[in-house]
Amino acid sequence: MGTLVYDGRSAVVTIEDRVLAHLRLVILAKFRRQESFSFNWVVGLANGSGRGTVWLAPGIPVYFQFDGSKEPSINKEWIDVLMLAANSPNGLSPIPEPAPGSGEAVSTRVGG
């Protein structure tokens, strides 16, 4: 399990390393474009359960810490789906990985 820390302390989110690696690529791509967006997550039972949302903006520190030492392979279709989510009014959130070759990113664009 990895950790995303935003603004030094305002949001500390524990996320599985593979998911975090994909989220990192999307978040950093948005920041390179100077784009802000919301990030949503489910708060686990160990932390009281519920949901969390934070507004991510370039220029505010974000830190990605991975427990594992190996960089996971990247699923480009997952990146596409996550980027679509980040660009939507609902914002970015950890979502299940689409199967490679599923065309989920394309159907998400067309279907809405």
Image (cartoon, rainbow, N blue to C red):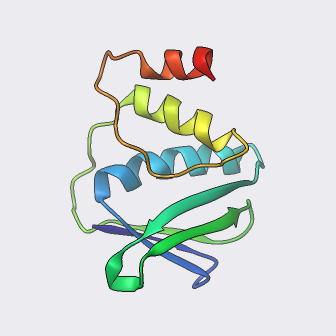
Q: Residue at x 56, y 70 (%)?
A: 52
Q: Residue at x 36, y 51 (%)?
A: 19
- The x and y percentages for residue 110 are 60, 14
Q: Residue at x 71, y 70 (%)?
A: 60
Q: Nearer the viewer, residue 67 or 84?
A: 84
- Would you place residue 76 above or below residue 61 in this image? above
- The x and y percentages for residue 21 are 39, 51
| In this rendering, position of residue 105 left or right of residue 34 | left
Q: Nearer the viewer, residue 18 or 72?
A: 18
Looking at the image, how many numbered discs can be counted on the residues? Answer: 0
- The x and y percentages for residue 106 are 51, 15
- The x and y percentages for residue 2 are 33, 67
| In this rendering, position of residue 70 left or right of residue 83 | left
Q: Residue at x 60, y 58 (%)?
A: 39
- Would you place residue 109 above or below residue 87 in this image? above
Q: Look at the image and tell me in which quarter the C terminus lies.
A: top right
Q: Nearer the viewer, residue 53 or 18?
A: 53
Q: Look at the image and tell me in which quarter the N terminus lies.
A: bottom left
